[in-house]
Image (cartoon, grey):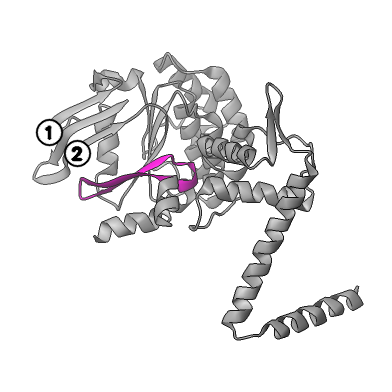
Amino acid sequence: MTHTFDTSKPIYRQLADQIYWRIIRGDLKAGQKLSSVRDAAIEFSVNPNTASRTYNEMERDGVVETKRGQGTFVTEDQTVLHQLREERKQVRIEEFVREMEAMGFSATDMIHGLKSYVDKEDQSQ
Amino acid sequence: MITLEDVSKRYFTKSALHNISLDIPKGGITGLVGENGSGKSTILKVLSGLINPSRGSVYIDKTPVTRRIASKVAYLSELDAFYRFYTVQNMVDFQASQFDDFNKNKAEDMLSFMKLDPKSKIKSLSKGNRGRLKIVLTLSREAPVILMDEPLSGLDPMVRESIVKSLISFIDIEEQTVLITTHEVNEMESIFDRVIAIKNGEILGIAHTEDIREKEGLRVVDWMTKHYNS
């Protein structure tokens, strides 16, 4: 699978975002072992130095932990994982709101539109 | 690790390189990018000792470059240089007989990674598989310096991807210094530590790929265009 990276951010940061997405979706669970830096580099087709920087960055964020001689694992700290999910939610909401505002919709329009969309989704399931 | 000092190269009346000075430290993958005829391949040929510069000095690992530098430099040519009647295995054995640093186990691993059958005749290989075989022959050498001239050129997307992945898997990025020329900048920028843009035989700029994104918010292609037009 080819991964594309956009221009706005450095690749090491985008790679971290992709791995965070897997954690948020539950593809990678709390305490689960991540692939090695080299395997991650191969999977995402990035320079191993970039992948290594991503792992350092994720460790600094507290989302993963490196255990000497064993590898890198997703943290089991639920507070951190909860925060990761919440941050992602805020980012998405902000994007949505900015775009709606740009199109001239009011806050009421947004809430109303969102509610009727969600209700319709519920009915069809 | 790779040093050019005031290097110029003229082909008869045409100037191919103009006063190029360059110092690439040990380790990492460097992309050499620029339009056709900008001098990319000439730089690689000068570094591999295949042609002599008209002026200036060239060093690999502090050794002045001559034809004998081939023992330190693995060079992948843009052209195919195979005996058509050889099998893939014959070609691997031939390469192993020419270079002391050739690692046969690595060659075997790479052949299976690239899904190449050692018993296939070279003349029956598709262009894509010939491209893959060239990569195997070059990267199976544990040479301190690897020079690759357009490794993706003329190959389909699937072959290009398998080659990019093989570069990541089989290059020892701390020990080996790799210089790759390419037109496929978008496909390769994620594996470059740094890029060098070149135009009309002169260096326009050198930058770390992540800095280009982080500080300038550009892809390498845009960065290159910016330098080309300025």
Q: Position of residue B40 (x, y in %)?
A: 29, 43
Q: The residue tagged with tag 1: helix, strand or loop?
A: loop
Q: Is residue B192 magenta?
A: yes
Can you tell which quarter of the image residue B84 is in?
top left
Instruction: Give me the residue at 47% from left, 26% from top.
Output: B174
Q: Which mark is residue B20?
A: 2
Question: Observer-nearest residue: B118 or B45?
Answer: B45
Locate the C terminus of chain B by quadrant.
bottom left
Can you tell which quarter of the image residue B112 is in?
top right
Q: Is residue B118 in view? A: no
Residue B191, above or below B45? below
Q: Position of residue B27 (x, y in %)?
A: 42, 28
Q: Which residues are magenta?
A: B188-209
Instruction: Give me the residue at 39% from left, 41% from top.
Output: B194
Instruction: Give me the residue at 45% from left, 51% from top.
Output: B214
Q: The residue tagged with tag 2: helix, strand or loop?
A: strand
Residue located beneath label 1 in the image: B54
Q: Earlier in the sequence, mark 1 or mark 2?
A: 2
Instruction: Name which residue type carries label 1.
Output: Ser
Instruction: Name which residue type carries label 2.
Output: Ile
Q: Position of residue B68 (x, y in %)?
A: 27, 18
Question: Observer-nearest residue: A60 or B58?
Answer: A60
Question: Observer-nearest residue: A48 or A110?
Answer: A110
